[in-house]
Amino acid sequence: MHPVDPWLEELAAVAARHARTQPLVRGQCVPYFRRGVLSVPAFKWNGAGDPTLEARAQSLRHMAKASQWPVDALFFDLEDAAPDQPQFKALARQFCADALRSAANAGRVLGFRPNDIRSPYFADDLRVVLPAAGAQVDFVVLPKTESADEVRDVAALVREAAARWRWPRVPRLEVLIESPRALLQAEAIAAVPEVAALVFGAYDFSRCIGSEVDAQTWLTDQAAARQWLPVVAAAHGKEALDAVTATLPIRPKDPTAPTTEERARHTEAIALCARDATDAARLGYAGKWVLHPDQVDPIQRAFSPDAARARRALDLCAAYARAAMQGSGAERDEATAGRVRLVDKAVAGMEFWVVQAGLRAGVIGAEDLARAGFSADELRAATIGRGRATPAP
């Protein structure tokens, strides 16, 4: 009988202990998919007539229309979009709950944004909206967050509400990072299990540090904060959402006869939005907030490959998976502008995100996967997660 080697025992114990810690990647703990996230005012009123009646009709009409826009996700806003007066906030809560119930079958990821936890409106926002429409809510946006403790406390309240009223799921939290303190707490916030996303709030962040947001230069001016959030979110299997592009593509007063200046302003605003969204996607953001319906298309396109790009990524992932099964740790890619690229697991993992985006956007589908010989789960296991990829029969 051989004596037990203490070093080998310790080696086995260390390996077993750390094997329990599985690597996390972006979105692994997020139960839904969205690229564009539309902010919809929960209160609209032109000032005429009785607000209880007229504001209700105008608000519900606006929210119903927004629910039909071709955007992946939307939330009804009780914070910035509702006037800071108790009577209007109270009406907005009722309108929000009604709109959530009506929009439940619109095929969108749905949420709402209450006022911040330090406001006099926060408790009533949750008290009114959650019991009335919590079963239809996929996420709650938390504005002006300052600490992970407050996020944990809100998460506990939402979790208890879901159990009390027997909702089909516990709504997730999408937390705005819009102050220096929130940025420093971002990792602890992302670690809260109910958090699905960190949302960069460029304008409030700028207000807090005494800077400005310039439409032309903000990507560089706020690079340090903006580039940090996708890293922190992915470390906990969550996602990051980019701030709004506030230069709005205002439509011409007369759509049948737009002036040269109106066309130029609209074109410039769309170009800025597309630039910002493309940059966000390159940094690892999963999506971006939308302020105007004309921003939906450039934002969702920025986070979606075209069919040719998605098929190429699928072919690369499948080639890597086959090579890995045969004992190779890499594959050659010779189809990129005449250059030869070594596709190892890291490169294949980047390509898998393109495959996943293509599947979610519908530009590739089951037939493409069948042609490649792998399921999406098998490709993910081979390129990002652990486990052996098995080709489809």
Image (cartoon, grey):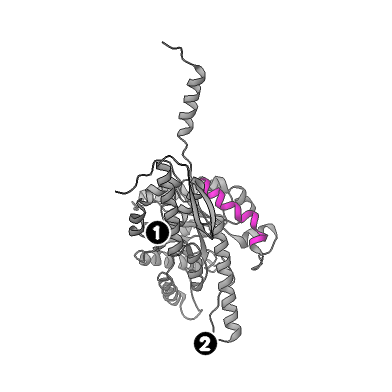
Q: Residue 382: percent from the left, percent from the top? A: 42, 45
Mark 1 element type: helix
Dot label at residue 359? 1
Q: Which region shows up in magenta? A: 219-236
Q: Is residue 244 above or below residue 56?
A: above
Magenta stretch containing residue 232, yes or no?
A: yes
Q: Is residue 100 above or below residue 349?
A: below
Specify whether residue 155 is in view: yes
Instruction: Give the crowd class for mark 1: few <14, some 14-19, many >=20 residues within 10 Å.
Output: many
Q: Residue 272: percent from the left, percent from the top? A: 59, 70
Residue at the disc numbered 2: 254
Q: Which residue of the protein is positioned furthest toward the right in this rendering? A: 210
**Residue 357: which quarter of the image?**
bottom left
* 97 sits to left or right of 114: left
Specify whether residue 72 is in view: no
Going from N to C along the chain, the mark reached first, 2 or 1, is 2
Q: Is residue 382 above or below residue 115?
A: above
**Residue 367: which quarter of the image?**
bottom left
State the residue in front, 186 or 238: 238
Instruction: Give the crowd class for mark 2: few <14, some 14-19, many >=20 residues within 10 Å.
Output: few
Q: Residue 14: percent from the left, percent from the top? A: 50, 27
